[in-house]
Image (cartoon, grey):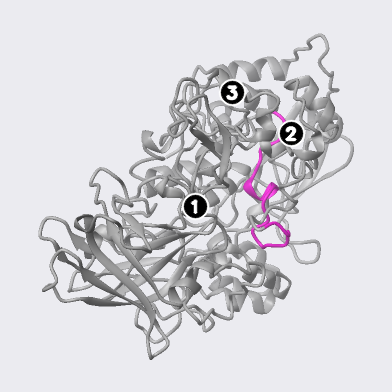
Amino acid sequence: MKKTITGSLLALASVFLIYGCTQTGVKSYPNTSFKGVVEDGSKETFLKVADATVWLIPAKDIAAMGKTPIEVKADSPNDEPLEDSLAANRGRYLNARTNAKGEFSFADVPGGKYFVYVEPATSKYLPGGSKSRKALGTDELGAAPMLIKISGNVPPNATYIGSTACIECHEDQKHFTKTLHRLGMTVIGKPSKLQDHSRFPEFNKGLDKLMAGTKFWFYGFDPKRGFDKYLIATKAPADASSISFTATFFKDADGKLKFRAENARDPKDPARVYTVDMTYGGGLYKQRYLVRVGANLFPFVQFNQNGDDSFADRTRKPWRDYHADWFFNEQTKKLIDPPQGKSFDKECASCHYAGYTLVKNAKGDYIAGSANDRNGEMDIDGDGKPNELNLGCETCHGPGSVHDKAKEIDMPATIVSPNKLSAERADVLCGQCHSRPQGNLNNDQPVNKDNKMMLPGTSRNKFLKEYTTRADGANTDFWADGLHSKGHHQPYSDLIKAKKYRNGTQLVACFDCHDPHGNGKSLHQLKRDPKTSEVCTSCHENRKDIKEHLADKSKCKVDPAKIACSDCHNAKTAQTGAGFGKGMIGKDGKNYWVNDISSHVYDVPRKDNKGVKGVAPGAAMPIPYTNSCGAACHDTKNL
């Protein structure tokens, strides 16, 4: 269903733009005429795209939308900048149709800035185009003929073929195997041929400790907590009566990692031994361990790479409980197997497996499946063929069977090229998992009624309508200001509220900063080093003089050489591992901690934020209370 808007301020803004409105101090743009061509593919292999409609969407309309509070819901009137503006102004915006040669022309375009947006005639191609993300002035539009590249779409009959088949042709992208998207799920001792851990020398720092033999005591059960209801220690607590059970990890004679669960409350309760099949994470901040119980996997125990036993906060120690309550029943005081409905297959795997599927067998087990690949990590569905258990090429480009068999000239039209999509469609491709919606399984997996993930190129509105039952995180996943994420894996939740997502200059896509293929040297797949300001000034060229910017905006006295843009604009509001240690000390002697997940709102959170001022350090939203920032502005003494 198309979203419609009537009588909006957006429509009014476009009237002023089209008929001319010049303000003092505002650049004046000339009227112009221009022409161009729409095609798919690369410089070498392409087809002209006929019967597509090229729209000129006034930049002022998008800027006006950016000043309205975003409505996070299906059929929102303002959460897809270009598509919502077009829905509101179809009868008013200038447009031209391409001929059989893909050519289009505009005879008289009023002076101003526009986003050039292509709407294909059929589902063979996807909307947006390579000129849709940056607003162009009429002086630029008229300077030379325009070439617009648009993305193909995966045909309905396309199926998954696995990343090995993709890399055989696209060998230049083989370094994709070094990204965290490819390394998240690793069979213990047997990384697949699609996994290269060389960038992460401490990937298995936690696993190595378990393989060497580690015993955990689970005690101090607190039913009010979330996934970490138990305190966990590698030494027996002083109060033996507080212990519920122990788990002893060991490398068995068969070479496999296992652990023995023993009931500390009832010695007659038989011990249970489980095999640990895979690690879950490990490249950055934390690692969990996937335990085999019958047909399913369950996560158990979290290792925090930056944790320290001296930290009083239980969430920042080296080891943290992760759903040990699934292995012990506090009411019966007995060891138990985890509930089938809480398996990794059903609760988590959709955002990790390439080509995710889910079926329920006669025993009530949820069995997940994914793309078959001869170099895959493990045969997860029991069909005798290895599966790709991490994100693959087809996660972002769509199932590739038709593309693989097509003639070279037809190949571009049978696969999705995210860099040719509008920013809003490119962003939701990442955002479906880098946010916290709930899907049709009534959990955090954003799947439709057929338990499938959305395909690349899907609009945000279709995603929200068909793949979610809750559009984003709950109130508890955000800080008291309702803006900044408190939970991890929510950068998209932040981004859609940011000025970078809705503005009249450039609509940012995730891959503007991150390289999903892993070409960059940053472990976060950033194209540039996040410890330097180049990661921002490569676009914000007018901010290259950091000292001048600091003096102008914040009266900051910190040596510019010691900080980067991200220190202020990407406050680490969320925590996934142990964080980065202690920040400044408050009046009460309590510490403000430095978290490990950056906000993607890109604002500078203030000390008077309702989630900060007057809030105890342990409960306050973490803004930059580091020693370097505190020396100038963020002094905790006045809070």
Q: Is residue 72 left or right of residue 272?
A: right
Region rendered in magenta: 504-522
Q: Nearer the viewer, residue 579 or 17?
A: 579
In the displayed image of the protein, which residue is found farthest to the bottom? 253
Q: Which mark is residue 135?
A: 2
In the image, residue 203 above or below residue 286: below
Q: Say which label, 1 or 2, has the lower sequence index.
A: 2
Q: Secondary structure at mark 3?
A: loop
Circle 1: residue type = Gly
Q: Say which label, 2 or 3, has the lower sequence index.
A: 2
Q: Is residue 518 magenta?
A: yes
In the displayed image of the protein, which residue is found farthest to the top? 24
The residue that appears at 74% across and 62% down in the rendered structure is: 46
Question: What is the spatial separation of the Cα atoms under label 1 and label 2, in whole angstroms?
Answer: 39 Å
Q: Secondary structure at mark 1?
A: loop
Q: Nearer the viewer, residue 569 or 125?
A: 569
Q: At which x and y percent is residue 612?
A: 50, 25
Q: Which mark is residue 577?
A: 1
Q: Is residue 415 left or right of residue 314?
A: right
Q: Examine the rendering and report whether any part of residue 159 can be seen.
A: no
In the image, residue 407 above or below residue 28: below
Q: At which x and y percent is residue 59?
A: 69, 27
The residue that appears at 53% across and 70% down in the rendered structure is: 204
Which of the 4 image quarters holds residue 125?
Answer: bottom right
Disc 3 designates what residue? Answer: 606
